Amino acid sequence: MAEMWISMGPQHPMTHGLWTLKVKVDGETIVDADPELGYLHRSVEKMGERRKYFMNTTLTDRLCYASSTTWTHCYVNAVEELMKVEVPTRAQYIRTIMLEMQRLASHLMWAGAYMPDLGHITGALYFWRDRELFLNLLELPSGSRLLYNYIRIGGVKRDLPDGFEEKTERIFKLFEQRLDEYADLFENSKIFRMRTEDVGKFTGSQAMNLGITGPNLRGCGVKHDLRKEDTYEIYEEIDWDVCTREAGPGYSDCFSRYMVRIDEMRESVKIIRECFKKMPKGPTLASRVPVRATGEAFRRTEDSRGEALMYLVGDGSDRPYRWKIKSPMFTTISACPYYLKGYKVADIPAIMGSIDICIGETDK
Amino acid sequence: MNFKDLQKQLKAMKGVTEISLIRKNVIKLDLDKLISKELFTKLKEEYYFEHCSLITAIDNQPDFELVYHLSCLSGELSVGDTKMAAMVEVHIHLERDSPSIDTVSDLWFGANWHEREAFDLMGIYFIGHPDLRRVLLPEGFAGHPLRKDYVYEIHEEEW
Amino acid sequence: MTLFGFCKTMAELTADMFIVPILRFQRNIFPPFSYPAGDLADWFSSEGGIVTLAWIYAVNIAFAVGMTNLILVIHLERKIAARIQDRRGPMLSFRAFRELGEDLAGKAPTWRFKENYSGIGIIQNMADGIKAITKELIIPNKADKFLFSMGPIIFISSSVFLLVLFPLSDRFAASAAPAGLMVIMAAFSIAPIGVLTSGWASNNKYSMIGGMRSAAQLMSYEIPLLLSMAGVFLLAGSYNPVDIVEQQREATWLFGLPMWNFIPQFIGFIVFMICILAEVERVPFDLPEAEAELVEGWTTEYSGIRYMLFLAAEYIRGFAGAAVATILFLGGWAGPWPVPPEIWFLIKVYLIIIFWIFIRWSVPRIRTDQILELGWKKLLPLSLINILIVIFMVEIYPYFADIISLPEVF
């Protein structure tokens, strides 16, 4: 068969999100790839220029609907740096707890969406059943399950409810047991390993040039986590480790990227437990938040998928003059010829699933 | 290599007009357009900035401004005694009619799509870019929406 | 009292009471049809006509039994899959018709959730079938219209044909072919033609790729399948399922427990189970119809009843595959007295099917090239080794005469 272009078009059960992946195929082997985005472009940046600073938190929630608190937090941190607002300590602890719980929910959503790509439909239901536990927990302080609008400029909207810590601890006991079960079911499964090992390889240095960050980069063995290296909130007072895995000296494959996220889930549980122990009492919102701002500021945070960066320019009015959003998936998707070449068409779901794509943040 | 040495060396280069420090680990520079490619090559090869985080295009009404954020991920640059990752923020000003600048996508592949987006939404042309076309907006779209003087009208092309 | 005997009596009865009088009556009334009617009436009273009628009845009864089993298999799969996934599966009960009745009578239905939706759920399958029938049959514009309709016909008819070929016991047999199992395997092998035709005629790159993958997988797993069956044929001495079960029933006993064929032929059993899973395209071998990669694979463009019949045909092939495995390796219908042999057969078939359901919902898919590698590089040599073992056993038979007693083979 000659080489032909197959378009895994915008409507496809495998591509998580709405984008087109065109692959050039020679028989069964991939020769080239050409991704196309833009189906979900909502012009968030231009809309943000028309709205006041505090109104934009509802827009940032909807940037990545699977992991919305981390995006709101990135924006709010950038605004606080622009306006030079001091956030009280208790609010910082609560924010850290929310972020880590959101990271857990996002990784569970990713795992639940990854399993059917490999053919394991039961895996989807198991992971999403656990995600339900965390969505219920996240509903208690903020009032909503998916798009929270909980982190505000200067702190958080309201304090944690009573009994939150006991509920969380109960759910963590169940969750850790289940993580051990899943380790037995997925990692020790020969077929799972056959599908994910030696597939979708790229080296750490290649990844840094291509603009790949986050768990994909940590799967190559590079110890880079923005929570330690460009620290924010209260991460430097908590004792936790950066999880890295590698499939070989300096490169990653789908299995190591999967394992990095499972390790991160366990680390998040540790971080939340420690935050609960160390949380002081105090106010949860800064007492005086200015309305106008001048200057420039940027903030980068460790989103569930990589490095999220927001750059704000203020011109003295109460609306941003320029707001730029950087999503980690933008560059990762652009680099897809590099990690798709040479593999088979049947590997595309395994590889693209292990990259963890969310198109909402990519298309803005 | 120490961060302070880097700051001194960058200050000494010609074409760098203003240099300051944000938040302990970010150097901010203003740069002349003509030596941009040379500086970027130097930043990548000698000073270990292997990751291009972001390229922003801003429309200050009389001119355009490009902001490059580059970061060092491997830990070769150390900021004092901390483990913080070093970053550089480069501002370049471009003229209003037909703004253009040399591309950096041959240095960092991650900059490829950022430059395409700057072209798509703001209209800045990158000389030497392998594939400069619209990335977020559909192909038949006319105009560059993120400019301040963009007026939304009902377009009549079919796409 | 065999099935055929029962049907022959029924045929004689119905022929005497209904068919022959009607035909003779017609001979007296309609002159253009009177002579053929008279000849037909004579033929039906003769031995040949009765035997043909008996065969038609027998095939229909076997078909009905097979279809009932199909519904049970589908229902079992849905319920067990649901329980593995921490949910309950279809729960519709017959009392839900009350809601339908109230709706038709014009009254607002009262909300009786717990009563209506807490049953066994077996009429859910009927509801799904009715839904599929009412959907529009779409043929894509540029597809080859004749082949588009032919593909399903080939696939489905060859699969349904399988239902009447295997006996449920030595007296419940709708087919008396002396080479019974060979006919079954031949009917299994017609399916790739239907798959390729459907995939190609859909005018869709994905379907074509799916069809080719499926055909490659099916054809490459035929060989280890047949070779692993060859061991049993050598031991039993014939292709007839009745003879094979007889050989297992009388021959192999180890410490008082039946040791049907899956212990002496252990390698053959394993190879056969893997190959038959690949033949009926169940997970872990169901890449050709995998949803993640190629939407639905070679069945993408089919809608409505054609699609439902594809799925039904796959389940029928699964059932037939399990039945063949039971006959060959698990002793067929052999079992102690109180339970009739048909029920033993069905129990063993359902055990195998439940085992397959557990595998399907616990294990991810294998990629096509890994499937083909498994088939050609690993299963084919194993099946050849199995044949060597059987020949070895047969040749040095006298030394094993006290444990295994084999019929006269060579």
Image (cartoon, rainbow, N blue to C red):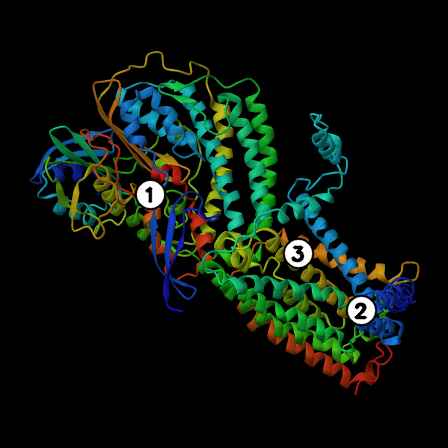
Instruction: Give the distance between the C-alpha atoms of the residues marked 3 and 1, in whole angstroms.
Output: 44 Å
Q: Which mark is residue A330?
A: 1
Kind of residue indicated by mark 3? Ala
| Quadrant containing the N terminus of chain A in the rendered view | bottom left
Which corner quadrant of the image does residue C253 belong to?
bottom right
Residue B57 shown left or right of residue A160 in the figure = left
Which chain does the residue under circle 3 lie in? C
Mark 1 crowd level (few <14, some 14–19, many ≥20, 10 Å Cα): many
Specify whether disc 1 shares its chain with disc 2. no
Above or below: residue A173 compared with residue B104: above
- The residues bearing labels 1 and 2 have C-alpha atoms spaced at a distance of 84 Å
- Three-letter amino acid code at the position of disc 2: Pro
Mark 3 and mark 2 in contact? Answer it, CB < 8 Å. no
In percent of width and height, residue C115 lies at: 76, 31
- Image coordinates of residue C396 in percent, x first then y, are 78, 85
Q: Which of marks 3 and 1 is in front?
A: 3
Badge 1 element: helix
For mark 3, give the secondary structure.
helix
Q: In which quarter of the image is residue C9?
A: bottom right
Relative horizontal placement of residue B96, taking residue C31 as reference (left or right):
left
Alpha carbons under labels 3 and 2: distance apart:
46 Å
Disc 2 marks which residue?
C31
Dot 2: chain letter: C
What residue lies at 60% left-to-right and 29% top-to-bottom? A170
Q: Which mark is residue C312?
A: 3
* The image quarter in which residue C383 lies: bottom right
Which quarter of the rendering shows the C terminus of chain A?
A: top left
Which percent across, then down, holds residue C242?
A: 82, 73
Q: What amino acid is labelled 1 in the image?
A: Phe
Nearest the viewer among A144 and B72 is: A144
Is residue A289 at least partly visible in the picture?
yes
Residue C316 or residue C22, whichever sits in front = C22
